[in-house]
Amino acid sequence: MQAEENAVQYIAKLLYEFGWGVDRIKQHNNWSGKDCPHRIRAEKRWDSFIQRISDALKALKTPVVQGVSYTKQEEDDEVKLNDTGRAAAREIIRRAVADGTFMSKHENVDKYGDGDLISYVFAYVNRKVK
């Protein structure tokens, strides 16, 4: 049902914006005693509804970029490229050298770690946007 999916996405967005977890979600029934949300309660789908919100919240916390995975940790952020992302980053760096954006030849680009690759790609994008 589209209305329910809209609710899942909206609730996940609110939780994300406020930095809250799914433990903050309550049924109207908890305060009013009304049978609400009636369909979810009648079909005994509350746990699955919460799980869908949890999954949507996790997706918001984990941005998806082709070839890149990002994990938010307590103290540090960690960005890792998969093989596709590494190949794309290396190609961007090679193009930046070829078009004169980067003065260094970056001869060892195939040996660069994920952090270096990402840094150079951001530098390239930053220079092109200005």
Image (cartoon, helix red, strand yellow):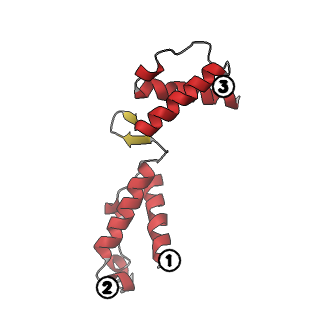
Q: Quadrant of residue 57?
A: bottom left
| Residue in view at x 45 percent, y 41 percent | 67
Amino acid carrying label 3: it is: Arg
- As measured in the structure, the alpha-carbon distance from the residue carrying label 3 to the one carrying label 1 is 44 Å
Compare marks 3 and 1 and give the one earlier in the sequence.
1
- Relative vertical location of residue 33 with respect to residue 129 in this rendering, above or below: below
Determine crowd level at label 3: few under 14, some 14-19, many 20+ residues with C-alpha closer than 10 A: few
| Residue in view at x 68 percent, y 22 percent | 99
Residue at label 2? 43
Q: Looking at the image, which residue sits at the far right?
A: 130
- Relative vertical location of residue 28 with respect to residue 63 in this rendering, above or below: below
Amino acid carrying label 2: it is: Glu
Element under label 2?
loop
Viewed as shown, does residue 76 lie left or right of 89?
left
Compare marks 3 and 2 and give the one earlier in the sequence.
2
Q: Can residue 36 be seen in this snapshot?
A: no
Q: Which is in the foreground here, disc 3 or disc 2?
A: 3
Determine crowd level at label 1: few under 14, some 14-19, many 20+ residues with C-alpha closer than 10 A: few
Element under label 1?
helix
Residue at label 3? 127
| Residue in view at x 45 percent, y 76 percent | 4
Amino acid carrying label 1: it is: Ala
| Label of residue 3 in the image | 1
